[in-house]
Image (cartoon, helix red, strand yellow):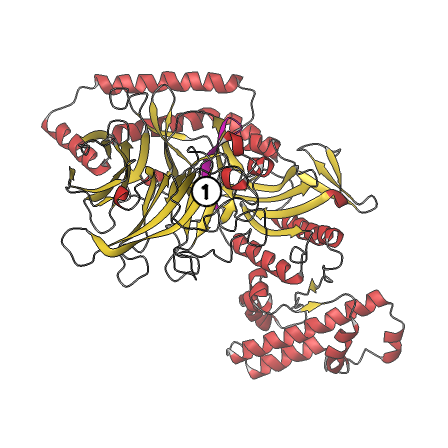
Amino acid sequence: MINRIFRFSLINKFYLVLHLALMSAINCYAQSFEIKEIELPNPEHAPSWRQLVKNPRSSTQFFLANRQGQISILNNEQVQAPALLDLKTFYPNLIALTAFTTHPAFNLSKQVGYLSFYTAHIEKPNEEANPNPISPYRFEQATPYQLVLSEWQLKDKTESLTLKRGGHKTILRIDVPSVDITIEQLSFSPFIQPWQDNYGQLLMTLGTDKNYQKIPLYSGAILRIQPEKFGTKNYRVPQSNPFIEQITINNEIVAAHLGKIHSIYWSKQHTEALFINHELKQKLNWSQITLGSDFIESSVKANTFYSAAQSKISNSIVYRGNKLKSQRNKVLYLSWQDQWRLMSTDSQSPEQPEIIHQFNRQEISADAELMLVVDQQNEPIIFNQSNASILHLLADNAQTLATTQQSNIKQQAPESSLVYLIAMIVIVVILIVIWLSKRSALPTIKKYLHSQYAQFDVNEAENQIALYQRHHKDPSLELSLSQIIESSIYLNGECLSTVRKNKKGAFSNQKERAVIAEIAKEQREKMVDDRIRKCELLITDSDKNSYRVCNYFRKGNQRLTKAKFEQATEQLIDWCWKISSVMNPQHTEARKIPVQAEVTLANTDSKIKEKLETKESILKPTVSQEAQQPSKAIDVNTTAQLAQTTEGINKTKENTSNAAQTDLDPQQKLQQELTSLSIVEALEKLAQLKQQSLLTEQEFEQAKSKILNLP
């Protein structure tokens, strides 16, 4: 099947490239960017502005902050005076303000976080400061600096924003040994609503120093807290933080060993996952992480969905505006490659980033330090920190098209430019087709699949797992099950279950039902367009080596792996039970086999059969219904209970006798008991149809008699 798909793509390669080229030309012709630059005045005797954050209460205002701790209001392109806040008034030893954000409930009155914002700065500690700062476990070196997280609240019902009296408090302090380790980003998830348990949790990214990369707190870490009063502290650690029970890692940490973190962001489709772009091993990586593991280099690599050579980049944002409809829910960032480019990428598929717009050097210089910000309409703004200027990207398709139509009515445009454009497109298409025809590399998705194992098999006799590369009949790697310390199964990048060497890490019937429910939910989704569905197994051995197996991959209507979805998921579930019995033999319970009622309609009248078939959802429960309802399961070791359940019905069968049952072997007895249970299920469904007035009394009695084989 794979070869057939690949040949098909070669035959249609020319048409595909031509279509893409024409669409790109149409988009460029219909949509253009107009760059509007605004230069901001600097406060006296202060460096340039470094932070720009929108004011959620206003459609025209932004918060501006510089490294010296001054925060002002930008209103209608004018900086208001005096400054809203000067942090040095509260923190005289301040070295630099490094991060700023607003609470998600900033504009929600009577909510915790109303009119509140947060700042992070680095300073030389004061002896009278917080006596219990956060510090690494048994870290004996000097820590001459402290990172400070502060909360500020503004006055309500005033014409201009002013600081509320007593509206300031220090949330926490962190001891650091180097001025290079700072809080780089403060962020709340935009997709978590006020009624959800984890609403209002603040995430912080800490920088790293090459001299302290083995210390989790200083290795490129992400911290998560709830900024609310808890005992003597002004914050509490969420109980869902993964390292609460580990002494060597601070409770506030949710991920570590990530290197230099440029930014963190969330996806609307994966609210439990966290996405980051970071520098690690001299590469720029976009990674998806699930909070709960110490992300050493091997596991970070396993969760990286795109990697590129190091280059100058900005922070990343998830686009949620309306003007660039094709980029909605994609990640936007700025990258330098001979010139600055506005790029987009999608974490859901391993594709190359897309260039949205290229800026010439007159618009943005090569040495510019850039920051992507969103305005009140969730449209992107470029904040140039080097010269304190704001670049608005004005892209309005409707206005551009309307202007073009008006100009065509007033005067006939010269056709030479259109002919030149078409000629250029044809030349470019020919060159691309020639290049693709000589290109020996596989498509991006196939490269992605070839970088992982495609199948696995368990050798019960040797107690080993064999991993196979794509199109290989012989195993590429054989691993003893006793060497495995962790095993996780994934569906579309989301972890469904993890088996570890502890009591809570054992696989169970409850976990199996949860996995089946997620699989059933995914099966109901239609595979339209370029939607991707994939199943993966991630194994970690005692040497911290990770092995990823992708035993199912489908994009749209093309399946690129041999196994079907049902086969792949069943294999993963069986593997969970197997590895759990090896890693946790004492805590792994007996597996229960789900029984699905199968109603035979051969003996029913055609009229009744038609009615039963129209209610297939009632007669034959789907996997999702079984996951939602209490599971009717039969333990293989307790078949005697089935005989008691079906005793009453068995007595109604004239062709069944005690002598005949005595002659049956155990396997036949089990089959007979399963058949009896199916009869009970069939009678229940008939009763439901009768209650819904889909069967008459006579039809009901006829169907019941035929199922029970009554005269």
Front residue of this view, candidates 657 and 529: 529
Residue 573 x %, y %: 66, 53
For the C terminus, the image quarter is bottom right
Residue 163 x %, y %: 22, 52
Q: Is residue 661 above or below residue 410?
A: below
Q: Is residue 75 above or below residue 687?
A: above
Q: Is residue 555 visible?
A: no
Say which element carries label 1: strand
Could you tell me which residue is drawn at 59 percent across and 68 percent down? 619
Could you tell me which residue is drawn at 68 percent across and 49 percent down? 571
Q: Is residue 371 above or below residue 610?
A: above
- Residue 1 left/right relative to 403: right
Furthest residue toward left: 410
For the N terminus, the image quarter is top right
Q: Quadrant of residue 76?
A: top left
Start-end of magenta stretch: 274-284
Front residue of this view, candidates 169 and 480: 169
According to the picture, the residue beneath numbered tag 1 turns out to be: 175
Q: Residue 481: say if magenta.
A: no
Residue 21 x %, y %: 37, 25
